[in-house]
Amino acid sequence: MKYCFLLLFLFTLASCNKEVVDQKELAGPDTFIIGYTGGWGGGPAFKLEDGQLFRSEADRNLGDPSQIINAAYLPVTESEDQIIVVDLISGFAEDAFTNVNPKFDCAEQAYDGACAYLIQVKGNEEIQFWTLSEFDTEINVDFADYMGRVSSALDQLWE
């Protein structure tokens, strides 16, 4: 089943309108990185870049968003992991994040808790990053739902 999904996904990419692809290339590809930050140093980061999934070499204490972006990564060969992250990122709704202030903190770390994070690198220049803490108030429901999906994806990747 997982191979069927992957083949369907690759076929869909190959059949994209050339004009749309060219516009995307001019803007530069978006890179997405997900992981946990907080107690016990968080966890590994998973980066989707140019359709390829990578996992950070370090498992903990990756630092702030710029350090995470520049960390050393190794390719992930598990197709199930690739499908999990591609599915997550394909559901990324930028408008759910529009009115959410970028932040990279996790109050839970004071008692060994962790927060899921999402880092988006647009082209090679603009960096945006978000965490969701249980202490956040007045949050967009769509943002909270998506960050819940990030957490679920990370849990699956760690199994």
Image: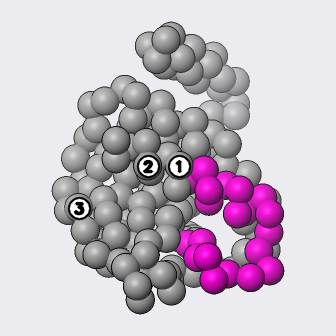
Q: Is residue 8 magenta?
A: no
Residue 126 position, x and y percent, is: 55, 70
Of circles 1 and 3, the one toward us is 1
> Which region shows up in magenta?
131-150
Name the image quarter holding residue 18: top right
- Amino acid at circle 3: Asp
Return the mark for residue 59. 3
State the SS at label 1.
helix
Residue 59 position, x and y percent, is: 23, 61
Relative height, residue 89 to residue 122 (above, below): above
- Amino acid at circle 2: Asp
Task: Check if mark 1's residue and mark 2's residue have beta carbons within 8 Å.
Answer: yes
Say whether residue 144 is left or right of residue 105.
right
Q: Quadrant of the C terminus?
A: top left
Q: Which residue is mark 2?
A: 155
- Amino acid at circle 1: Ser
**Residue at the spot 58% in from the left edge and 45% down from the top edge:** 89
Q: Cα distance, mark 2 to mark 3? A: 14 Å
Q: Cα distance, mark 1 to mark 2? A: 5 Å
Task: Check if mark 1's residue and mark 3's residue have beta carbons within 8 Å.
Answer: no
**Residue at the spot 40% in from the left edge and 85% down from the top edge:** 111
Return the mark for residue 152. 1
- Closest to the observer, 105 or 121: 105
Q: Residues within 10 Å of mark 2 (few under 14, many from 20)?
A: few
